[in-house]
Image (tube, helix red, strand yellow):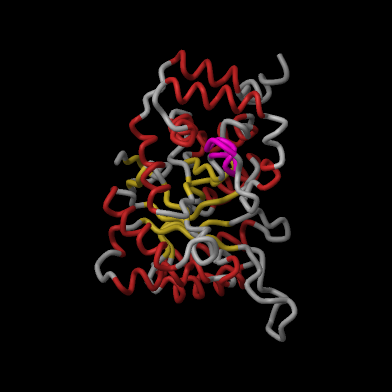
Amino acid sequence: MEYTHLGRTGTSVSRIVLGTMNFGDRTPEEEAFAIMDRALELGVNFFDTANGYGGSGGRGETERIIGRWFAARPGVRDDIVLATKVHSPMVDPTSDGDVVNARGASAWQVRREAIGSLQRLQTDRIDLYQFHHIDRHISWPELWQAMEVLVAQGTVVYTGSSNFAAWNIAQANEIAQQRNFLGLVSEQSVYSLIRRSIELEVIPAARNYGLGILPWSPLAGGLLSGGSAPANSRSAELTSARADREEQLQSYERFAQERGWTPSALGLAWLLHQPGVTGPIVGPRTVEQLESAVTALDIVLNDDDLRALDELFPGPGGQAPEAYAW
C-alpha cells in the first residue's frame, strides 16, 4: 500500500480510499465485514461513509454496519482514519418526527448529526467530518463555530467538504483563517477520465489551500470498468451514455488490454497520477472488487500514456481562465 498525507495535515492515509456507500444496500453486512477485514490486510486505512448512506437498509444503516464491525474487532478503531459526512435529511418527512431542522449544515444539525454518527459508528471521534454539500442558507461563522466546539471536545479531528465549488473552498478557508481555525483539509468531488471539470477551478483552489482531493465515482459509474455500468449506479446518467461513447470506451479498453491492465485499474491509476489527488474513493460490492482496485497502485503511467489518455478523454484544457481565455 502507498500512503500520503491528508491534505496539509500530518495524518497519513492510504492512496486507495474505501467507500462504503453500498454497505446495507447492494452489499449485505457479512460481505461488508469481509471487505473491511480485507481492506485492513491490504493496508487500506482510510474509510469513507456518510450519515445518510444505507439505501434499502434505511438512512444511517451504513454507519451502523461499520459500528458493529468496530465493536466486533476491539482495537481496530485506531488503525482507521474514519470519515463521514453531514447534510442529508435523516428523518422520514412522512413521519411525526422533527424534520424542520433535520437536514443541511446549521449549527443545530451539525451538532445533532455528529452525536448521531458517533452513536451509529460506536466510536468516540470522527477523524474527518465532511460537509456533504454546500448549504447556502448557513453562514460560515455559524458553521465554523459549531465545528470549533466539536474539535475542542475531541469529537472531530479534521473537517472537509464534498461537492464544493472553488469559491466555496476559498470562502470557507479564508474565514477559518480569520478565526485561527484549521478549516477544510479535503474536498470530495466527482472526478474521472470522463468527468474532468474540476480541473478548471476546484483542483487549483484545493491545491492552493492545501486540501487533498478525494475523487468519488472515479470509474464514472462503471463506464471505465469495462462493459456496461450497473443500472443503479451512482452515475446512472452515464449508464445510458455507453452507446454514445462506445467507440471511445472500446479504444480505452484496448489501450488497457494491450498493456496488461484492467480498465478499472487504469482509471484509478490515472487519478493517482493527477496533481492534488490524495486517493480515489472506491465502492466495492465484493472483496474481489476491492482487491482489483488496489492493483491500480502497481500501474505506472509514463508521459506517452498520459498524453494518449488525454487525447482519448480530453479535459477542459487546463485550469481557468487559461483553459478558455488568453
Q: Position of residue 296 (x, y in %)?
A: 39, 35
Above or below 158: residue 203: above
Secondary structure mainly formed by the magenta segment = helix
Q: Position of residue 295 (x, y in %)?
A: 36, 37
Say whether residue 222 is magenta: yes
Q: Residue at x 31, y 64 (%)?
A: 77
Q: Is residue 218 left or right of residue 100?
A: left
Indicate the quadrant containing the N terminus: top left, top right, bottom left or bottom right.
top left
The residue that appears at 49% across and 71% down in the rendered structure is 117
Residue at image coords 66%, 53%: 134
Quarter the C terminus occupies: top right
Q: 54 or 102: nearer the eye? A: 54
* Residue 223 at least partly seen: yes
Residue, far bottom: 96
x and y percent of residue 318 in the render? 61, 22
Q: Nearer the viewer, residue 85 or 302?
A: 302
Residue 275 shows in this picture: no
Vertical placement of residue 70 versus 80, above or below = below
- Specify the quadrant of the image occupied by residue 14: top left
- In the image, is residue 274 part of the stretch drawn in magenta? no
Residue 73 in percent (x, y) is at 28, 69
Marker count (numbered): 0
Q: Which residues are magenta?
A: 219-227
